[in-house]
Image (cartoon, grey):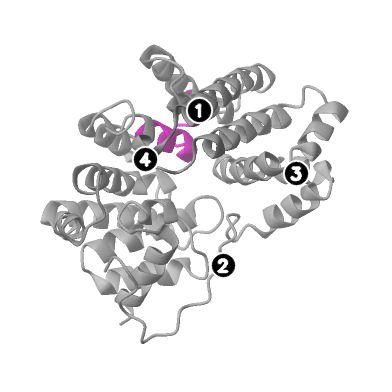
């Protein structure tokens, strides 16, 4: 199952745009690339925190490729809080590019140095954004995510989480950054990671995307325990056995029920959530549940980073999972 095994079906038509179904964001991003920074400013204004979080991420990646339009915005409207938040997002995207996607043992000292340097700059930019937007949780997420580059301390992490959640108790990006920071492969442990993921979902309103964070924690656990050094068939079998456990499957189902309780969701992180549910059910060998999640997600191919934990290529693994579920 590490390669495409089910080729009897025609592949679905997939949309790989990271903006997913946020067509206002797509239009604003494309206009920003052409120099219309006002389009980026306008699409960020007035959106809820989860949608804004995704828009900052996509626009930050866009600026990492060419920041001229962001620099023009900063010149024309110095001190605009959203421009400051976006600058931090741009720097974190650039940090990720500097490090690369390889494992630590295949990452050079020069790459790690670039990762740390740009991460420190992102943290400084986030601190400036906090001064400009004191009521916004997004800059606090910028502080937490920048700490993945090796900057900061546990007291600073705790302070940033407390301040960010005081502004939005169920801020998805902030909680996701915390779960990542506290996982074993970064600066925590399995126990701290699961506690953070479950606390994020505790008491959240029906339909909130944070309900699926424990599912993501299970991916982190399985990857670290079974696929840390290999993507072998034997490791994949161990992953499938883990997700097939009654207690793990029950928690995935509970997360899915709470996430779906408010009806179909779009925009923000909903596509990522549906992708995670599809992956968890593929790994558990439950095709009907996997098909249901794919149906809610398609045509968008989201969340492939998690698929890459268990397949040699996340995007190809997504298609392998879809083919298996629909065989």
Q: Quadrant of the C terminus?
A: bottom left
Q: Which of these two is toward me, 301 or 297?
A: 301
At 84% from the left and 45% from the top, the residue drawn is: 35
Graded by Cα atoms within 10 Å as few (under 14), some (14 to 19) or many (20 or more), the crowding at tag 2 reads: some
Q: Say which label, 3 or 1, has the lower sequence index.
A: 3
Graded by Cα atoms within 10 Å as few (under 14), some (14 to 19) or many (20 or more), the crowding at tag 4 reads: few
The disc at residue 110 is 1
Q: Which of these two is toward me, 6 or 157?
A: 6
Q: Quadrant of residue 44?
A: top right
Q: CA distance from mark 4 to mark 2?
A: 28 Å
Residue under numbered circle 3: 40
Residue under numbered circle 2: 15
- Can you give x and y, in whole percent of width and height, for residue 29 in the image? 72, 50
Q: CA distance from mark 2 to mark 3?
A: 22 Å
Name the secondary structure under disc 3.
helix
Tell which tag, 3 or 1, sits nearer the viewer: 1
Tell which tag, 2 or 3, sits nearer the viewer: 2
Name the secondary structure under disc 4.
loop
**170 inside magenta stretch:** yes
Region in magenta: 166-179
Graded by Cα atoms within 10 Å as few (under 14), some (14 to 19) or many (20 or more), the crowding at tag 1 reads: few
């Amino acid at each position: 199952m590490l390669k495409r095994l089910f080729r009897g079906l025609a592949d679905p038509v997939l949309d790989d745009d990271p903006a997913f179904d946020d067509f206002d964001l797509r239009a604003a991003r494309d206009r920003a690339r052409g120099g219309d920074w006002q389009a980026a400013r306008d699409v960020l204004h007035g959106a809820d925190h989860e949608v804004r979080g995704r828009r900052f991420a996509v626009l930050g990646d866009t600026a990492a490729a060419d920041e001229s339009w962001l620099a023009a915005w900063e010149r024309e409207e110095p001190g605009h809080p959203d421009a400051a938040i976006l600058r931090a997002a741009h720097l974190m995207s650039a940090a990720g590019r500097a490090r690369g996607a390889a494992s630590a043992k295949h990452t050079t000292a020069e790459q790690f140095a670039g990762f740390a340097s740009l991460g420190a700059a992102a943290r400084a930019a986030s601190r400036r954004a906090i001064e400009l937007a004191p009521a916004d949780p997004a800059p606090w997420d910028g502080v937490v995510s920048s700490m993945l580059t090796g900057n900061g301390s546990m007291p600073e992490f705790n302070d940033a989480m407390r301040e960010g959640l005081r502004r939005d108790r169920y801020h998805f990006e902030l909680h996701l950054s915390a779960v990542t920071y506290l996982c074993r492969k970064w600066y925590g442990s399995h126990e701290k990671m699961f506690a953070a993921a479950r606390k994020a979902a505790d008491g959240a309103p029906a339909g909130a995307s944070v309900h699926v964070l424990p599912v993501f924690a299970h991916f982190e656990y399985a990857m670290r325990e079974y696929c840390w050094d290999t993507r072998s068939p034997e490791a994949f079998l161990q992953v499938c056995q883990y997700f097939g456990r009654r207690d793990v499957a029950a928690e995935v189902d509970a997360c899915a029920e709470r996430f779906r309780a408010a009806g179909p969701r779009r925009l923000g992180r909903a596509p990522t959530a549906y992708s995670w549910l599809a992956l968890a059910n593929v790994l558990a060998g439950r095709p009907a549940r996997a098909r249901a999640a794919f149906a809610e997600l398609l045509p968008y191919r989201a969340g492939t980073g998690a698929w890459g934990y268990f397949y040699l290529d996340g995007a190809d693994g997504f298609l392998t999972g879809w083919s298996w579920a629909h065989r």
